[in-house]
Each structure stands twice: as C-alpha cells, then as structure tokens.
Amino acid sequence: MSVTADNATQKTPEVAAEAGRRRTFAVISHPDAGKSTLTEALALHAAAITSAGAVHGKGDRRGVTSDWMEMEQARGISITSAALRIDYADCVLNLLDTPGHADFSEDTYRVLSAVDCAIMLLDSAKGLEPQTLKLFDVCRARRMPVITFVNKWDRPGREPLELLDEIEQRIGLRPTPLNWPVGIAGDFRGLVDRHAGTYTKFHRTPGGATKAVEEVLDPEAAAGVEEAAWTQASEEIELLEALGADFDEASFRAGESSPVLFGAALPNFGISQLLEVLVRLAPAPAPQPDAKGEPRPITAPFSGQVFKMQANMDKAHRDRMAFVRVSSGRFDRGMVLTHAATGRPFATKYTQAVFGSERSTIDTAYPGDVIALINAQALSVGDTLYDGPKVEFPPIPSFAPEHFAVARAVDAGRYKQFQRGISQLDSEGVVQVLTSDVRGEQAPVLAAVGPLQFDVVRHRMEHEFRAPIELAHLDYSVARRTDAASAPVLHGLSGGEVLTRRSDGALLMLVHNKWRLRVIERDHPGLLLEPLLAGGVVDGD
Ligand SMILES: Nc1nc2c(ncn2[C@@H]2O[C@H](COP(=O)(O)OP(=O)(O)OP(=O)(O)O)[C@@H](O)[C@H]2O)c(=O)[nH]1
Ligand SMILES: [Mg+2]
C-alpha cells in the first residue's frame, strides 16, 4: 500500500468525527433585519470576542465585527459577506454574514452555495420582506434547512402567531417554534423553552455591549413575576400544542419545516438559545455532489471550492484571498493541491482562518470549514482544489446584470493601476467586466446586478488601487448569452451590442429593454439569446 493511501485510511475516522462537529451556516434576510448584529452577538456569546462592537465599533456597536470594510462602516450596511469561525460547546461554527441589499445578492448567492444551513432573520415589526422571500427561494431550490430567528423583539412589532401564520401562508414553510416570547414585541421579558418548559428572564446590560443576564425560573415562579404576560404566553403555547406545531427533524432537514426562535440581537436576548439550537439541530456537512452529480464522501481526500474572492482585506499586505469551503478530507497547511480548472499545482503555505477582518494562521481544517488562501492570483469563484484523483464541483452561476456603465481612468497616466484594479474587481465578482474590440481595453463595460455595485467599484478604485474612474452609464437593461454563430448577425442590429465577458469568455448580447429583445427574437428566431440566472431563478421573460 502506498504511503498516501495508508495516510488516507488512518485519517478517515478523524475526518468523520471532525466534520460531525462542524456547523456551517449563513445568516440571510432583507437589509437591516439585524444579520450583522446577530453575527456579532453569536460571537460574543461563544466568547470569541469580549464585548460586542469591540473589534471595530469603539464600543458603540456602530460597526460590527463582520462589517469590516470602510464603506460598510460609513454607511452601516453590509456590502460583502464575511466569515467568522467560532468555537462553541465542542462544535466549530463557521458563520457567514451576508449583505441583505438586493444589489449584492450575487455575493449572498455564492455564500449559500458554501453552507449547509441558513438562519433566516425576520424583523418582528416587518415579517417576511421582499429580499428575504427571494433568498428563501434560493434555499428552497437547494432544499436547504432553514432556522427562523424573529429578531428585534425588544421593539414594537407584530403578534407572534401572526408572524408564524405569515411564514406558513407565504412561503409554505411549516413553522415549529422552539421557544416563545413572554411579553409582546416592545415589552420583551423572556423566553419559554417549549421542550423543557422552563422560563428564562432577561435583564439588560447597558448598551447591550455584553451578554444579557439570564435568570431561569420554573413556571410557577414565572407566573408570579410576569403575571398577565405569562398568562397570555401560556395560552398561546397551548394553542401551538393544539396545532401540532412541534419540531420535526426529518421535515426540517428536507427544508419543509423550520424551527423558530424569538430574540433580540442588539440587547443580546435569546442568543444562547440560538447557539444551543445550532449545535443540537443544524446539520453537519454532508457529501457534496460533484460536477457529474456524484456525491463526494466527506472522508475522501481533500477537496474544496472557492466561493468568494477578496483583495486587500489587509491594507498592509495588499494581497488576494480565496475563500474555500472544505468539502472533503483533511486540509494540512503546506499541502500542494491541484487547481481543477488548469491542472496546475497550488501551494497552501499561506492559509488562514478568518474572523471578520482578523486573520490567523490555520494548520488543519476539515469538511465544513472555511479557509482563506492567500496569494490566490490563479483562482476564481467556483474553482475546485483537490488532492489525489481529480474532482470538480459544479460552477457557481453568475447573475444576469441589469445595469451597465463604461469605465475610464480619470488620469490616463494611471492606466496600469486602472487595469490592475478592474481585473481584480472582476475576479472578485464585484462587477462583471465586459470588453469588445470596438470599445477597446481602455474602456471596459462594467455590468452589475444593482447600481450600488458601481459605488463600490468607484470607491475601491480610488482608495485601494489609486486609480479614480469615471463611469458613463449605458442605456441597456437586459443581457442574454449568445454564441459565435449568432454574434455577427446581432452585431449588425440596432438597439443592442455584443460584448465578451472577461472572466469566462462568454458572449453577452446587451439590449436596451425587454421590448427590443422581443422584437429581435421575433425577427431572428434562429439566434441564440439565452436567459441568465436572476436572483437564483432564471430570468425567463
Ligand atoms: N432594537 C433593536 N435593534 C436592532 C436589533 N438587531 C439589530 N438592530 C439594529 O438594526 C440596524 C441594522 O442592523 P444590522 O445588523 O446592520 O442589519 P443587517 O441585517 O446586517 O443589514 P445589512 O447587512 O445592510 O443587510 C442597526 O441599527 C442595529 O443596531 C435588535 O434586536 N433590537
Ligand atoms: Mg449586515
């Protein structure tokens, strides 16, 4: 038996055991529901940080651990996803905070391809908001288990039963509350654990910067303390029992029912309860299907997929990192992997674990973990890295852009920096970069799902690459994939233009609007004009 095969056999039980301790999940929702605040609260409770807001927010919680980018702190929104690794109760939680804004949904979509479970956040006053619905559709398409967290219960909001009803009616997900709030939204007293029957009363700490104080009471004592609020909660819980809204593992795993928890991330109420649920109920990594649709056992030799690229996270080093989700096997820093797209070796001497903007060297990783490979110039989103016999995971699709602008360097003398910046932002997928012989390399067309992406490009080109740009918007709103046979005919038509996407060489036909597209399709039925993916679903009309 060869040395490698022998090592592989010895590692199998270890890999299986370590994978079993992993919980890899994303927090998703409409903007402002509190994803970044919850991310930080989870880290605080798992004692990964000592006080919420400590890492960036100077104690006032304005910036949170996962919102590390300058623009995010200035605007108070998440622009890009962030990874945090948290050790808790003999588990390793790999948490991915995602941006809620629709303009950044492509990033969120990529993250959803790298996790085993999602926490869907609802604002207690708003319920299911449009972007939450879209993201839930992506989870449903992947049959991904979803845990629902009703946040901001410390603020005036809706009736808890009404929120459950909305989940059931609008998305057909059967809600199964694991705990129940005592006190209406805005008067949050504590939570009843439906299984244990115990009551946890919360006491605020100033500013919510540290863990809330929890007092556990038995039902009799709770009734004495909370009086009418307790009676109401008890009646509602009886109703849940009558409805049979009880947790069911099989339907949760199949993405058909969702355990529901109530809480408030800002004052840190209900966070330890969520952590317990993640440990107890969230799925451990399962075999991931490869490009041929065959599930790759988690104990197979190392394999992983790049789901995110990010440059210049560390200003001092100006590096380029690839975030890889480990799918199978044990990763040992220093091992030489193969890059499936090129067949070339990839050295892993510089590999790190990330915690928002903080990084530390990581020596070993297991399925479910997220590792950051430094100096990853050769890698792109969707790429597979493996050890041993070749394996490749299916590509992560890019979205249909709907906004287009021509970029030019303000200062022609900084053309080199301009080129470097544009190609970096292209490989990160911040925008798609399109070119054509007609327009030339000096004037690439940037294609975005939403206009906020242009603001990010403008900001990063100026501050990171020192190459300020001008953007001239183009009057197109639809992109379709075409091919070399159709392109010459399309070139000659008015109301559109064919460009090449730099990242993968795809030919895209840009058209002013859907009406113009319909006319072209009607007049030239033989041409290829294939819809692209829009927000997780094909943009068919
Ligand atoms: N009162 C109250 N405010 C909260 C709670 N959770 C979050 N917030 C506030 O809601 C606002 C938005 O919170 P974020 O955590 O940035 O929301 P987000 O979902 O990450 O937003 P995006 O990343 O932009 O999609 C902030 O002002 C938070 O302080 C909560 O439980 N109670
Ligand atoms: Mg956020």
Image (spheres, rainbow, N blue to C red):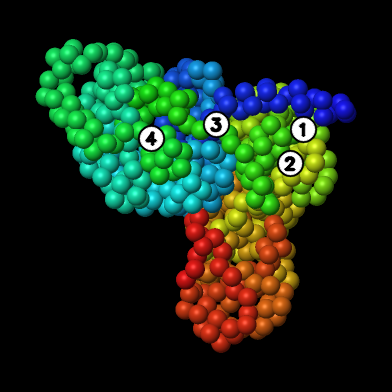
Image location (x, y in percent) of residue 391: 74, 45
Element class at badge 4? loop
Crowd tier of the residue under label 2, counting other residues whose Cα lies within 10 Å: few below 14, some 14–19, many 20 or above: many
Q: For the residues marked 3 and 2, what is the alpha-carbon distance in whole angstroms?
A: 21 Å
For ligand 1, tell me if the residue under mark 3 lies within 8 Å: no
> Residue 233: where, in percent of width, then height?
19, 28
Res 284 label = 3
Indicate which disc, 2 or 1, sits on the residue closer to the N terminus. 1
Identify the residue under disc 4.
Answer: 248
Towards the viewer: 425 or 535: 535
Task: Tell us which disc is closer to us: 3 or 2.
Answer: 3
Q: Residue at the bottom extreme?
A: 523
Mark found first going from the N terminus, 1 or 3 = 3
Closer mark to the observer between disc 2 and disc 1: 2
Residue 385 bears which disc, if any?
2
Amino acid type at image mark 4: Asp
| Mark 2 → mark 1, Cα distance in angstroms | 11 Å
How far apart are the two marked residues, 1 and 4, measured between alpha carbons?
42 Å
Question: The residue under label 3 is which amino acid type?
Answer: Ala
Q: In which image quadrant can residue 479 be found?
A: bottom right
Q: Earlier in the sequence, mark 3 or mark 4?
A: 4
Q: Nearer the viewer, residue 194 or 232?
A: 194
| Foreground: disc 2 or disc 4 | 4
Helix, strand, or loop for circle 2? Answer: strand
Give 233 or 208, whichever is nearer the viewer.
233
